[in-house]
Image (cartoon, helix red, strand yellow):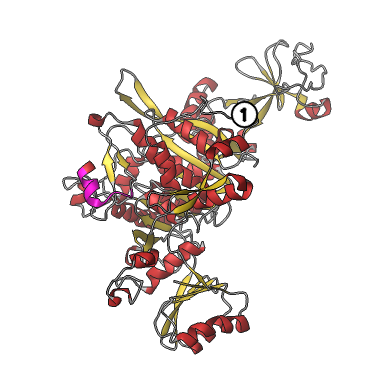
């Protein structure tokens, strides 16, 4: 019978065990600050094991470092004695929903999710503080007492969440921001699936530093692109109209064949415009201007244009180079005759991409169309006015389902207007992201039903809104996890006056209202609900973690190792976190001989935390053949019942893992 630790995973110990398995010779002993002997690593010897040259001391190397980096690594790896507590009263459709909204410091939340969501998240999108001098930067010294922290920073919320404002007066310190981000991205990487993708929105202030720490944590080979998002809101703060931000893209592993696409949305709208242009006999150049406006609105490639046949049949098209791609391989060489001059066209230096029979399938000299700019179309092959330019393949938009995601995107930043539309003209947030850009990001990655989208800087809950939008459009049944620190709203703010005391209250209400709006507009039967959890101290008393420090306490104080204000559901959630079960799994409680028994995902986990649990109750639980079962150490009716537990399960459900707390 195993005893649960009831704390988050200690990644330092996990990493230690991995090193010990690979290099047992580098494991040694040393005394800690309390004088106790403990295992440690001989790092000089480990460096030698990992080097193909004689290691004699510290050498200069290419790296990014700052005051606090080692602390960030330590914080990412250390465990915490905290838990998540269910808040059913704030949830929507608790029994059926698979979406989560978690209130608390995101570093603590990420630590708590490490077991349940290890290698399970398909997409992570975050929009962290940009370090503009007005953002809140999270403070992660969990070893400080509340009084010490208040003396140091003077800022803490009523729940003990630590944060401070990185203002002009403290110089917008890069170190504070980097320390905050490093530990969170380090843990987030563990949550990503092997085919998972990380998207991070960022401004000019920290984009270079963010790229460096992501290269270090995610691996520089796993960097995909830095998208420039033209949000079209000029900000003249340095004598130039700044209209862009960035979206960094990293994959968990580049061994997968990723293809980031953007759906050919709005084609009906484009076709309607084409019909209007044709009806009015609009000149090609003027028509292209009108189409380009619509293209930019949809984020399409400006290079796509149109041509007209003799009957003014406008068609959208884009040229694709037929020359051989860069490399050492030479392609086939043959002549392609110009349709008017009859002379061979220019042949690429490395030959053609296709063999001639494939080229001929697309080339049709009988279907010759002269374009207004003097060039020609023959079937699907484009020719210049003469033979001195290489031909190109023409790809029609109507024949393409998706386009590759572009490294430059033009999407209007109308996030504030969206929030105002939901909250009767009140925005409550400065520059919230628009759902259009998040929709694009989510749908650029191939997902399957049940795939999870995580946002641990969820703010106004744009990501949750976008996931619902996307699900209503393609019914992919994605799930989301939103994480947000319950930062208090200023007492003079519109949000506070409207009754929203912290950001989480606004975010949850935004999801509710957006869900109602999407359901009314689309009628789609998707998951509109969410379960709410809140970070709190562990359900277990200190004596559970440090029984050796018990001393001469009053026996009444240790009659139970569980805090008096905690329920069976509170305990169940903490057990699920340690057992690695997702918090969205179905849960139900049953009464068995007057005792409350909790079931998670059928028989994946069965738990009973009541006192005086009899043999007959245990027998009925065993008959359900759970994969794992959990009791309180003090739950059993008497000593004989405790002894009989293992025998009953050996007889009725031998594969069950039995644990106690």
The image quadrant that residue 86 belongs to is: bottom left
Picture coordinates of residue 340 (x, y %)?
75, 13
- The vertical placement of 581 against 312, above or below, is below
Question: Position of 73 compared to 377: left or right?
Answer: left
Picture coordinates of residue 487 (x, y %)?
27, 49
Picture coordinates of residue 602 (x, y %)?
54, 73
The image quadrant that residue 652 belongs to is: bottom right
Instruction: Tell which residue pokes out farthest to the left in this image.
Output: 492
- Please indicate, yes or no, whether residue 87 appears anywhere in the rendered image: no
Q: Nearer the viewer, residue 330 or 126?
A: 126
Counting labels gives 1
Question: Position of 148 compared to 376: left or right?
Answer: left
- Please indicate, yes or no, whether residue 520 appears anywhere in the rendered image: yes
Q: Who's the residue at 41% across and 48% down the image?
A: 456
User: Alpha-carbon neighbours of circle 1 within 10 Å: few (<14), some, or many (≥20)?
Assistant: few
Magenta stretch contains residue 223: no
Q: Nearer the viewer, residue 520 or 512?
A: 512
- The vertical placement of 464 against 532, above or below, is above
Magenta stretch contains residue 144: yes
Question: Position of 69 compared to 601: left or right?
Answer: left
Q: What secondary structure do most residues of the magenta stretch adopt?
A: helix
Picture coordinates of residue 412 (x, y %)?
40, 34
Q: Who's the residue at 50% across and 42% down the image?
A: 198
Q: Who's the residue at 71% across and 19% down the image?
A: 391
Q: Who's the residue at 32% across and 38% down the image?
A: 431
Residues rendered magenta in the picture: 142-151
Q: Secondary structure at mark 1?
A: loop
Q: Which residue is mark 1?
A: 54
Q: Nearer the viewer, residue 115 or 144?
A: 144
Q: Name the quarter where the C terminus is drawn.
A: bottom left
């Amino acid at each position: 019978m195993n005893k649960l630790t009831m704390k988050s995973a200690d990644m330092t110990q996990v990493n230690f065990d991995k090193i010990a398995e690979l290099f047992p010779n580098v494991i040694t002993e040393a005394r800690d600050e309390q004088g106790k002997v403990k295992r440690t690593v001989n790092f000089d010897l480990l460096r030698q094991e990992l080097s193909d040259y004689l290691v004699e001391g510290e050498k200069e190397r290419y790296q990014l470092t700052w005051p606090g980096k080692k602390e960030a690594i330590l914080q990412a790896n250390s465990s915490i004695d905290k838990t998540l507590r269910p808040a059913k009263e704030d949830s929507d459709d608790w029994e059926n929903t698979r979406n989560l909204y978690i209130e608390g410091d995101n570093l603590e939340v990420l630590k708590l999710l490490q077991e349940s969501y290890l290698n399970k998240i398909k997409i992570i999108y975050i929009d962290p503080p940009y370090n503009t001098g007005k953002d809140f930067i999270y403070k992660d010294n969990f070893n400080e007492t509340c009084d010490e922290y208040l003396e140091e920073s003077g800022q803490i919320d009523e729940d003990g969440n630590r944060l401070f404002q990185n203002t002009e007066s403290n110089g917008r310190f890069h170190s504070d921001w980097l320390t905050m981000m490093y530990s969170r991205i380090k843990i987030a990487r563990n949550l990503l699936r092997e085919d998972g993708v990380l998207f991070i929105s960022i401004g000019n202030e920290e984009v270079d530093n963010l790229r460096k720490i992501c290269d270090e944590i995610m691996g520089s080979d796993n960097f995909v692109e830095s998208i420039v998002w033209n949000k079209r809101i000029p900000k003249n703060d340095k004598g130039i109209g700044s209209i862009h931000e960035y979206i960094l893209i990293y994959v968990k592993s580049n061994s997968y064949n990723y293809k980031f696409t953007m759906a050919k949305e709005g084609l009906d709208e484009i076709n309607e415009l084409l019909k209007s242009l044709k009806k009015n006999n609009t000149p090609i150049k003027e028509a292209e201007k009108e189409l380009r406006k619509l293209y930019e609105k949809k984020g399409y490639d400006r290079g796509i244009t149109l041509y007209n046949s003799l009957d003014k049949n406008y068609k959208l098209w884009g040229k694709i180079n037929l020359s051989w791609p860069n490399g050492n391989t030479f392609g086939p060489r043959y002549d392609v005759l110009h349709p008017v001059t009859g002379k061979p066209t220019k042949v690429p230096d490395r030959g053609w991409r296709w063999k001639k029979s494939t080229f001929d399938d697309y080339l049709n000299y009988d279907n010759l169309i002269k374009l207004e700019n003097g060039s020609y179309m023959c079937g699907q092959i484009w020719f210049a006015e003469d033979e001195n330019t290489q031909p190109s393949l023409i790809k029609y938009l109507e024949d393409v389902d998706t386009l590759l995601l572009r490294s430059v995107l033009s999407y209007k930043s109308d996030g504030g207007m969206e929030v105002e539309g939901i909250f009767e003209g009140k925005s409550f947030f400065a520059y919230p992201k628009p759902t259009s850009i998040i929709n694009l990001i989510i749908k650029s990655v191939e997902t399957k039903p049940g795939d999870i989208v995580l946002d641990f800087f969820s703010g106004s809950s744009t990501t949750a809104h976008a996931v619902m939008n996307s699900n209503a459009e393609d019914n992919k049944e994605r799930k989301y996890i939103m994480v947000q620190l319950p930062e208090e709203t200023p007492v003079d703010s519109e949000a506070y006056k409207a009754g929203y005391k912290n950001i989480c209250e606004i975010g949850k209400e935004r999801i509710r209202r957006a869900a109602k709006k999407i359901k009314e507009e689309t009628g789609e039967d998707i998951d509109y609900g969410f379960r709410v959890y809140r970070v709190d101290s562990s359900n277990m008393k200190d004596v559970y973690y440090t029984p050796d420090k018990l001393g001469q306490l009053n026996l009444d104080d240790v009659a139970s190792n569980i805090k008096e204000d905690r329920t069976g559901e509170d305990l169940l959630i903490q057990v699920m976190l340690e057992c690695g079960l997702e918090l969205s799994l179905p849960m139900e409680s049953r009464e068995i001989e007057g005792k409350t028994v909790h079931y998670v995902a059928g028989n994946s986990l069965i738990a009973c935390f009541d006192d005086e649990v009899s043999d007959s109750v245990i027998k009925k639980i065993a008959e359900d053949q759970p994969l794992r079962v959990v009791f309180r150490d003090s739950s059993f009716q008497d000593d004989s019942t405790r002894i009989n537990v293992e025998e009953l399960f050996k007889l009725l459900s031998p594969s069950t893992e039995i644990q106690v707390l």
